[in-house]
Image (cartoon, rainbow, N blue to C red):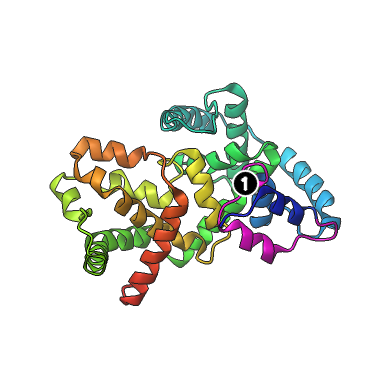
Amino acid sequence: MACTEEEFTELLSGEVYIDMDKLIAISRHGIPDKVRPEVWKYLLGVSKTDKSEEERVKKQQQQEYKEIDKNDTETTKKIRAHLKRYHNRDKSDTRIKIDWQGVEIRNKIENIIIAYNKYNNDLEYSFGMLSILGPFISTLQTESDIFFCFAAMMKKIEENLQIESLTLKLSRFIMYFRSVLPELNLYQLTNNYNLINFLRFSHFEEEEINSNDWATSWIQNYLSCELPIECTLRLWDTYLSGRLGLDLHVYVCLAILTNFSDELLELEHSEILSFLQHLPGIDIDQIIAQAYNIFDDIRANNEL
């Protein structure tokens, strides 16, 4: 069960230090909107748990960010072109409204991405950067806070990819979807005596759905492009604090496919792609619980 805003506030108001074990434990089931900015900064290691160091580190970060050159005409052009695409994915009726085309937000995004690329020895810009940055723009206010949280998240993703590459993650996801997920569904049908439709990979094959058109983005960008923003924020609460961390993501994707089986089975090629690229709002707590169940079932069947 999710903890209340008051419980988070009490923990965050510690005068000497922040008890990270407790903060991680209460964050797994969701973080209230008002305290999420502060909690995420602790979970990502941007804010220091020692309160005596917190103000000094914050000023140091602000100064460090201020000194990074944020001028790059070519990258600015690419970001502005991609912002139209990112803006168009967020047309659903969501609680959190962000004017992605507004000058203030656009300037923030351009500054942060250009600074991040220069901070990391002139990295090449990609749309994935904008996708990962989006949730932080939606959550935090201060530009330097957004920058350092974004940089910390990108580092987490990079470290995770060093353990298992994007290609291997994608292959494993498709393998589970193709062979393991139907077996798990059949197992559940047999044990629950509940006749329901479930999605098979063969339906996507029959409709000539290329995994590159949807699955790559799902896996690479942690559903930050496809889900309504409040769903992404809730999902990332668990990615930043749950026992599996980012490794839960493949199973979240499988849980989403399972959840939308009935809808997807009724759709044809272009409709399927549109649905997968613009997912409707969904109960993320239910999806996370289902993802853990899928993980446990696959492990029990020695498929991991």
Amino acid under disc 1: Pro
Q: Which residue is mark 1?
A: 32
Which residue appears at 40% of the width and 41% of the height?
A: 226
SS at badge 1: loop
Magenta-colored span: 14-36
Magenta span: predominant SS is loop
Q: Is residue 297 visible?
A: yes
Indicate the position of residue 44 as horizontal and vertical percent values.
64, 55
Q: Residues within 10 Å of mark 1 (few under 14, many from 20)?
A: some
User: Foreground residue, 259 or 90?
Assistant: 259
Q: Is residue 290 above or below residue 35?
A: below
- Where is residue 133, by image quadrant? top right
Q: Is residue 255 above or below residue 293?
A: above
Q: Is residue 165 visible?
A: no
Give the number of callouts.
Answer: 1
Indicate the position of residue 183 as horizontal and vertical percent values.
23, 66
Indicate the position of residue 89 as horizontal and vertical percent values.
41, 32
